[in-house]
């Protein structure tokens, strides 16, 4: 973790978010279906946070080892483009860098949220490394900010609200939201 001054400096630079799914946008619980898809439960407040990021022009990506059509459909509703969903990503750093390159972003302008060992390579490279409160200790050790909320329990909302408020962009526009 970093001190408050350094955290604020990092928050002010953020132009994009990238997330793991299981344990970050969900609590990590999985329900296996006969067709092979895995059902996950998403938190509506996290979803609203993602939507607020989208409405404020922030780019968003998924970088996850999982592959799920239902996750892709859910995240499209939150403003994450399908082409920015890196599913089946076992070595996550190259996909993170592709996302940065696609939008002309420096690594320092992107916040990455992860909770487990495969996320560490990206967390060490991004501008703002974040994890939920229930992340593994190895991840917490490399993060700039540990949310007080668990994965799938408000972590993403907490982070996005923190970034947008720090940048003076936390305002709800019902007209833009309804479109």
Image: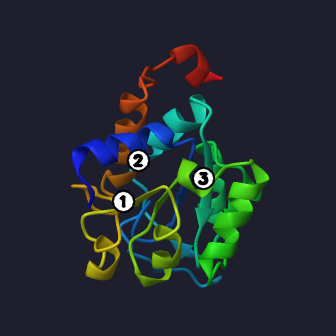
Please indicate, yes or no, whether residue 11 appears anywhere in the rendered image: yes
Secondary-structure class at tag 3: helix
Q: Assign the N terminus to one quadrant of the image.
A: bottom left
Q: Assign the C terminus to one quadrant of the image.
A: top right
Residue 86 coordinates in the image, percent (x, y): 68, 68
Report the residue marked by disc 2: 46
Q: Nearer the viewer, residue 170 or 175?
A: 170
Residue 24 coordinates in the image, percent (x, y): 41, 64
Position of 106 compared to 117: left or right? right
Which residue is at a point 39% across and 41% down the rendered structure image? 9
Q: Earlier in the sequence, mark 3 or mark 2?
A: 2
Position of 77 compared to 153: left or right? right
Q: Earlier in the sequence, mark 1 or mark 2?
A: 2
Mark 3 crowd level (few <14, some 14–19, many ≥20, 10 Å Cα):
many
Report the residue marked by disc 3: 75
Which residue is at a point 44% across and 40% down the rendered structure image? 49
Q: Nearer the viewer, residue 149 or 178?
A: 149
Which residue is at a point 43% across and 57% down the rendered structure image? 42
The image shows residue 38, relative to residue 86, as above or below, that is below
The image shows residue 136, relative to residue 44, as above or below, that is below
The image shows residue 109, relative to residue 48, as above or below, that is below
């Amino acid at each position: 973790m970093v001190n408050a001054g350094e955290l604020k400096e990092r928050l002010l630079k953020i132009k994009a978010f990238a997330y793991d799914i299981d344990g970050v946008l969900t609590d990590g619980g999985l329900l296996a279906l006969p067709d092979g898809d895995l059902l996950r439960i998403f938190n509506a407040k996290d979803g609203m946070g993602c939507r607020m990021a989208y409405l404020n022009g922030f780019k968003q990506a998924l970088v996850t080892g999982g592959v799920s059509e239902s996750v892709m459909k859910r995240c499209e509703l939150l403003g994450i483009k399908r082409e920015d969903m890196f599913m089946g990503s076992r070595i996550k750093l190259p996909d993170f860098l592709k996302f940065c390159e696609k939008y002309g972003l420096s690594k320092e302008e992107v916040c990455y949220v992860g909770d487990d060992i495969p996320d560490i390579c990206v967390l060490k490279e991004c501008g703002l490394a974040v994890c939920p409160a229930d992340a593994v200790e190895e991840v917490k050790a490399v993060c700039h900010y540990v949310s007080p909320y668990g994965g799938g329990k408000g972590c993403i909302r907490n982070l996005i609200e923190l970034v947008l408020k720090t940048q003076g962009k936390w305002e709800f526009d019902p007209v833009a939201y309804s479109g």
